[in-house]
Amino acid sequence: MSSAVFEPARPGARAHSTPPRTDVYLHPGYVHASAEERTIATILGSCVSVCMYDRDRGIGGANHFLLPYPVAGEHASGRFASAAVVDLINRMVALGSTPGRMEAKLFGGAAVVPALRVRPDHLGMQNVNVARQLLREHGIPVRAEDVGGERGRKLFFCTADGSAWVKLL
């Protein structure tokens, strides 16, 4: 499969069969949330992007993290799932949402380095599992995901309705 199309979260909105225009490019370690319609794009390998949206309020956002937890001596930042997921939730709350109205989609977590593919708990899947755990702890359901495998992904996410377009690289 070279690409996947995910249906929008809002009835009447259209799914994208080609990449939509990009309003925000999300670099590793960054988080973006908006109460205005924005299309967020990013490239993922073993990194993970948690995309969240509040379909009733049209609020959404995404993060792009590299590691599950900070390593010794590192300051917690958007580079780590433990900080990036909480930061995204807080940004959406500041825009008028509540965790009870948020829904999530997960992308990434591939084993792109051949030497790491021998372990089922490779770095990419550790990132995915920590994201799932954090979302579960905050009561935010995961509505769709495209995770794991051996190839990276190009992701486009629409903050207003939760629609996503993914292409395997």
Image (cartoon, helix red, strand yellow):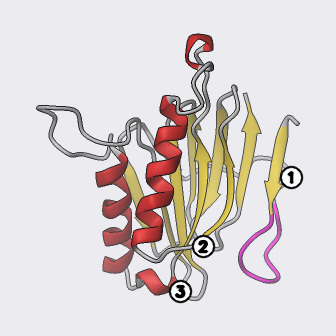
> Label 2 sits on what residue type?
Ala
Q: Is residue 62 visible?
A: no
Residue range of the region highlighted in magenta in the rendering: 7-15
Q: State the residue at coordinates (82%, 54%).
A: 5
Q: Nearer the viewer, residue 65 or 136?
A: 136
Q: For the residue labelled by badge 3, is the local secondary structure a helix, a strand or a loop?
A: loop
Q: Decide: is 158 above or below 168.
A: below
Residue at x-position 54% and y-position 59%: 51
Pointer 3 residue: 57
User: Which quarter of the figure is the C terminus placed in?
Assistant: top right
Residue most toward the left?
Answer: 73
Which badge, 1 or 2, is on the more N-terminal residue?
1
**14 in the magenta segment:** yes
* Amino acid, disc 3: Arg
Q: Quadrant of residue 32?
A: bottom left
Q: Does 43 appear above or below 83?
A: above
Q: Which mark is residue 111?
A: none
* Residue with the mark numbered 1: 17
Q: CA distance from mark 3 to mark 2?
A: 8 Å
